[in-house]
Image (spheres, helix red, strand yellow):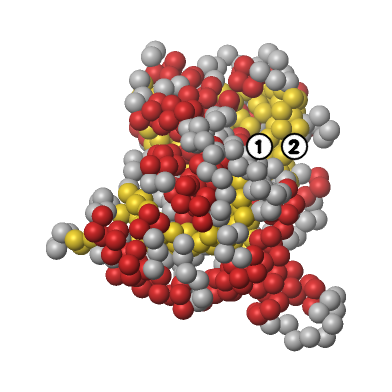
Amino acid sequence: MPHSTKYVFVTGGVTSSLGKGIISASLAKLLQARGYSVTIQKLDPYINVDPGTLNPYEHGECFVTEDGAETDLDLGHYERFLNIHTSKGNNVTTGKIYQSVINKERRGEYLGKTVQVIPHITDEIKRRIKLLGSKQMFDVVITEIGGTVGDIESLPYIEAVRQLRWELGPTNTACVHLTLVPYLAASGELKTKPTQHSVKVMLENGIQPDVLVLRTEHPLSVDLRRKVALFCNVELESVIESIDVSTIYEVPLLMQKEKLDLTILRKLNLPIGEEPQMKSWKQFVSKLKNPKHRIKIGLIGKYVELPDAYKSIVEALIHAGASNETKVEIVSVHSEGINEANVAEKLGDLKGILVAPGFGHRGIDGKILACKYAREKGVPFFGICLGMQCAVIEFARNVLGMENAHSTEMLHTTPFPVIDLMENQKGVTDKGGTMRLGAYPCSVKKDSKAFEAYQKTEIFERHRHRYEFNNSYLAQFEEKGLRPVGVNPETSLVEMMELNNHPWYVGVQFHPEYKSTVDNPHPLFVNFVKAALVFAKK
């Protein structure tokens, strides 16, 4: 294996949302399957320091890493494909870059020089890119640049890439440019002009792409590929077709067929080695596409209009479904639309109910009603973060007789604050990066559904919250059958609650969805789907 790190840069043109993250993860998966150590980094051009303060409608889900970084949702794809942990170094934003440069300027580190985009901002970008490779000596670091080439905010990143390619030399870097080849139904033609214009913008910025990945709805002819290769100045085998597929998990297999990994290895002057070992991946895709069972599971949340808002939960259910050879049909139910009169109609044909995480009062009543419905009707229930807290509130009100029990997040004057602000969060005023974040230990009780899933008494799960179960009420909950089965061994924070005498009613304070991967579907999701299958047969 090589001793110096090679760098692959993935850029996008023509339009956003073409799937740079999936292409990056697919390439990384193929290189990993050939025996190379690979990681992926996302450079985001927005000025927010991280997506932790962004509304999910703005940017989709905020993904949390093991070390507690609030990051772009593409890092979730990286982890799910590669089955490795990412870290705060895997996501860099313009906000972080400028914050770092301004802090250095305030400390006098630039020795009185005028601080400018070039060289200071671009130098900081280059430092962040190289830092990831030098820290752990990866063979290949894939760097995905957010946004679309030509955007003003992306220019410093493109310039930094241009400089790095010059500094590191031609065999140590490769640039993959992802574009769209639109199909005009009126004329029945695929059009290459947008790709040509996109590459022209790259050339104007001093970068010649090495590989073009063309998103398309229809197969690309050899003539069309030859035309793109000729006008965009790339080799014919470097024009890669990325046709629409039924699931993102087919993309690595598609890229293997198109020999994207071979093309990149040749560009980087790396040994080809053996064919990628993709047997388990193919088995996963086969189970995904050929299920033996089908069930409906309700996802109860307040951002359901945007699928990316609950991306990790959706993918974790897909992993768990494949593990159970089951097609999980996710029924998105807006919690604001649930009331006493329609709850049975909205949730009646569901075989499992998952109450999603979130912040704020909007839609909370609908979530609480969903918890009550699942508890009373014996429907398998999974509450995550705020979902668990809603289950606690519902139980307090309707079983323990605590009228107006609530979380102090929603009702500061509640007479029964069964969910309360964590002690170390009191006095915190800044919003960004100040929650309980990252992986923490949890002790699991053996006589529990949780232990059945994990088969361990000690686990680590990732958190993103400010409020927790109020232990002052613990004895009353245990007495009536909603008991803690997972507790933080250091702080006694209740991590998991389960309802006795119910087929499967589990609430967790942490976010298990962040750790579910293709190779390791999360055990709680696997067992939740299994319980839903059993319930469906009744």
Give the residue pinned by disc 1. 510
Relative image position of residue 334 (x, y in whole percent): 43, 44
123 left or right, relative to 323: right
Residue neighbourhood size for the residue with mark 1, other residues' Cα within 10 Å, grouped as few (<14), some (14–19), many (≥20): many
**Tag 1's secondary structure?**
loop
Which residue is more in the foreground, 291 or 205?
A: 205
Name the residue located 39 percent from the left edge and 60 percent from the top edge: 235
Give the mark nearest the N terminus, 1 or 2. 2
Q: Which residue is mark 2?
A: 440
Tell me whether the residue at label 1 lies in contact with that at label 2, contact meaning CB atoms closer than 8 angstroms: yes
Question: Where residue 495 sits in the image (x, y, percent)?
Answer: 70, 32
Closest to the camera, between mark 1 and mark 2, is 2
Above or below, comparing residue 402 to residue 186 in the picture: above
Seen at 62% across and 16% down, the residue is 452
Mark 2 element type: strand
| 386 horizontally vs 338: left or right | right
Can residue 358 be seen from the camera position used here?
A: no
In which quarter of the view is residue 45 placed? bottom right
> Of the residues shown, which amino acid type is indicated by label 1?
Phe
